[in-house]
Image (cartoon, rainbow, N blue to C red):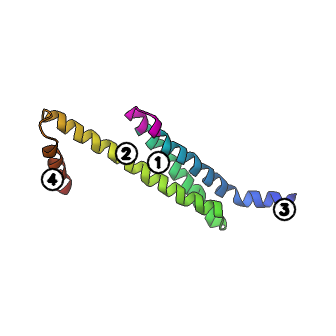
């Protein structure tokens, strides 16, 4: 029994990192069911936090010794972090496009898109 406790104490960070990655996946998928853009933004910020904490736990576990759960958790947490950041960037990009379109009086979406591309390239 004592040997079983030693194994659990040596893999605890990997297990926590993997569980956080599963929780992060739920957070990443849940905005599909929510119609409020503000809540989608909040969930994306929460996804970034969960991803960073999960990455830290997985790295700690990998420094202690390799663990398959830690490796899987690290990969999933990195994916969660990247997708959450892209989600926030797309939120602000969409907000900019819509506000520019409304300011132009809704005349031509192509002009607004071309102006956005010029601003991005500069």
Q: Residue lying furthest right in this view?
A: 1
Q: Which quadrant of the figure has residue 109? A: top left
Q: Which mark is residue 3?
A: 3
Mark 2 and mark 3 lie on one chain; the one further toward the N terminus is 3
Q: Distance of mark 2 from mark 4, alpha carbons?
A: 21 Å
Is disc 1 surrounded by few (<14), some (14 to 19) or many (20+) residues within 10 Å? many
Q: Distance of mark 4 from mark 1, alpha carbons?
A: 30 Å
Q: How many marks?
A: 4
Q: Measuring 47% from the left and 36% from the top, which residue is drawn there? A: 33
Which residues make up the magenta segment?
Answer: 31-40
Q: Quadrant of the C terminus?
A: bottom left
Q: Measuring 61% from the left and 54% from the top, which residue is drawn there? A: 18
Q: Position of residue 24 (x, y in %)?
A: 54, 47
Classify mark 3: helix, strand or loop. Answer: helix
Mark 2 and mark 1 lie on one chain; the one further toward the N terminus is 1
Q: Is residue 8 left or right of residue 48?
A: right
Q: Is residue 85 above or below residue 69?
A: above
Q: Distance of mark 1 from mark 3, alpha carbons?
A: 36 Å
Q: For mark 4, what is the residue?
A: 118
Q: Nearer the viewer, residue 45 or 116?
A: 116
Is disc 4 surrounded by few (<14), some (14 to 19) or many (20+) residues within 10 Å? few
Q: Measuring 72% from the left and 61% from the top, which residue is drawn there? A: 10
Q: For mark 2, what is the residue?
A: 88
Q: Is residue 57 left or right of residue 90?
A: right
Mark 4 and mark 1 lie on one chain; the one further toward the N terminus is 1
């Amino acid at each position: 029994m004592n040997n079983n406790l030693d194994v659990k104490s040596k893999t605890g960070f990997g297990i926590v990192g993997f569980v956080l990655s599963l929780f992060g996946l739920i957070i990443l998928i849940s905005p599909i069911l929510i119609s409020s853009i503000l809540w989608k933004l909040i969930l994306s910020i929460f996804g970034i936090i969960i991803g960073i904490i999960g990455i830290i736990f997985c790295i700690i576990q990998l420094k202690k010794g390799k663990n398959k759960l830690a490796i899987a958790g690290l990969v999933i947490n990195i994916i969660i972090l990247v997708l959450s950041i892209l989600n926030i960037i797309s939120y602000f990009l969409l907000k900019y496009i819509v506000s520019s379109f409304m300011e132009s009086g809704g005349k031509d979406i192509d002009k607004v898109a071309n102006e956005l591309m010029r601003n991005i390239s500069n």
